[in-house]
Image (tube, helix red, strand yellow):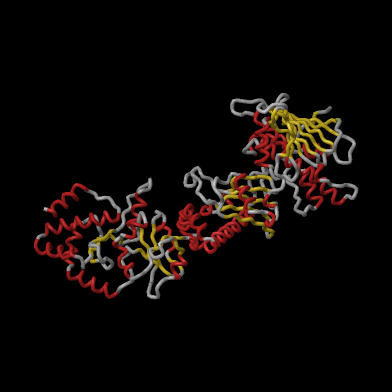
Amino acid sequence: MEKIQFKAESKRLLDMMINSIYSNREIFLRELISNASDAIDKIYYKALTDDALTFDKDSYYIKIEPDKENRTLKIIDTGIGMTREELENNLGTIAKSGSLAFKNENEIKDGHDIIGQFGVGFYSAFMVSDEITVITKALGSDEAYKWKSKGADGYTIEPCEKDTVGTEIILKIKENTEDEKYDEYLEEYRLKAIIKKHSDFIRYPIKMEVTQSRLKEGSETEYEEYKEEKTINSMVPIWRKNKNELTDEDYENFYQEKHYGFDKPIKHVHIKADGTIRYNAILFIPEKMPFDYYTKEFEKGLELYSNGVLIMEKCPDLLPDYFSFVKGMVDSEDLSLNISREMLQQDRQLKLIAKNIKNKIKKELENLIKNDREKYETFYESFGRQLKFGVYNNFGQDKDVLKNLLMFYSSKEKKLVTLDEYVSRMAEDQKYIYYATGETNEKIEKLPQTELVAEKGYEILYFTDDVDEFAIKMLMSYKDKEFKSVSSGDLGIDEEKEKQTESVEKENKDLFAYMKDVLSGKVKDVKASKRLKTHPVCLTAGGDVSIEMEKVLNAMPNNQNIKADKILEVNVNHEVFQSLKTAFEQDKEKVKLYTNLLYNQALLIEGLPISDPVEFTNDICKVMV
């Protein structure tokens, strides 16, 4: 028996296989099972053109046999087997794929795709094995052969005995080290888990003897263990079944089985695409937010399969960040994989699938708004914040995708409404979409700044999320209607009232200038208010940064001490203003006292801290005395 050396380039590749190409050792089993599935597929294809050959699917299977005592793991298939020449070509030359050659020679196009492409997966077994033995008998041959190798030193081939057609791979599992516990690849529970994870949808049964438990004969309390051969994999994935065969319960069971979440999904979407790129997908819109959703530990992404074999547990490129809550999977036969089958070589294919998925998710969410509002509001309670972040992120490049999905609490409807619904109800003379910001709906409702807009009968949207105003400023307008904060300088409402206010302001310009000087460094200006009806005073912002935005930005870890340009507005029709005018004529010190009190009052209304609470309380005492 002659030892045959691997070619020099094959030695280098084998070393790469063991140390570099694969990121996860457990995938060796996926690769060997995929090869076994290919071997059975080849008989299927031959049966299509050879009338003398019949293909009874029930006769074909893959078997896994762990043996702890001898430290071996067998992978047995009833596939096409290999001749001596094929052993030398396929296993003697690393990266020569017999499956790829077979696929090309037979022009396979019927969707029963051959999985293997690169001819390197077999050698991944050396990551967990000291020695690999392959015993094989080819279809139509009377001879069987044994291939054996301990790695880069080479291999041997010799004739042997084998009664049936097919291939048996025997791995001599490595001994444990301090860093690696190779025993796990001999454990029944671990092997089952790997098969379910990576090869659950291989189209042929993967069999293994598993430990069962039963009552001992004649006993009502004592149990005994026994071994029984079971099929581990599901074989037919749910996404390849016809939609009309499946019920909501089937999809919900799949959601639970795949551990996508502990909740019940609000919506499932089953996609079968046969266009430029073929793929199947099942997507789920969850009901509840995962506990780690807004943490750095959360990973977005869909499971990615290639022809039923799991390639990536979470493929982030399939989902935009703003739809990162979506769970599910994608399976495509058209993906160009890299040598390890763990990553993609061409992102064009993935981008096309991702674009289609994005559009489908958007459409389904829009349908929920129209047809099942209660479910959408449940969803929005959990993930609406993420949609708003999507509008704000990337300088608003996705705002047009998301704007119709946004909802805000309405001052009129007393519930969440869409921007489309708001605009459809706008009065003819209404120029803007009005909004107010605050911690809660209840607090916003009491804000002095809302008085004039509310008096005109205009609807106000309440912003209570810290991202709301940032998103709206990025959106700028909706259906040609500009957004306007109730705290904005120009509300565009009552021109006559504005003229009257400007007139009073001119008459009392010295008083307002004096008050501004008292509050130097605290406010940009003090002026007569056009919006206040019953409240004496309020704060508004004179620039792009609102007071609410100031709060949000300064609460961040990288606080840059950003300040809004605050304007103190005084209600010139309030009794307090008359007191100010009288004090300005008679006692300037009293004007200082009143000004500081009004400023601190305005701060409290906005939920902003008072810089000197002791001084504030002393000022109150002075007024009382």
Q: Position of residue 484 (x, y in %)?
A: 37, 65
Q: Residue furthest top?
A: 69
Position of the N terminus by quadrant: top right
Q: Is residue 398 left or right of residue 608?
A: right
Residue 139 quadrant:
top right
Q: In the rendered image, is residue 7 in sight?
A: no
Left or right placement of residue 246 versus residue 373 in this view: right
- Residue found farthest to the left: 586
Q: Residue at x 38, y 72 (%)?
A: 430
The percent position of residue 364, horizontal first and vertical second, equals 57, 60
Q: Residue at x 59, y 59 (%)?
A: 360
Vertical side of 448 occupied by 620: above or below: above
For residue 343, say whether it is visible.
yes
Front residue (pair 483, 102):
483
Tell how many labels.
Answer: 0
| Residue 479 in picture, x, y percent from top left | 46, 69
Residue 547: % across, % down: 32, 56
Q: Nearer the viewer, residue 578 or 355?
A: 578
* Side of 37 relative to 442 (left or right): right
User: Image quarter for residue 24?
Assistant: top right
Q: Nearer the viewer, residue 594 or 91?
A: 594
Vertical placement of 79 versus 549: above or below?
A: above
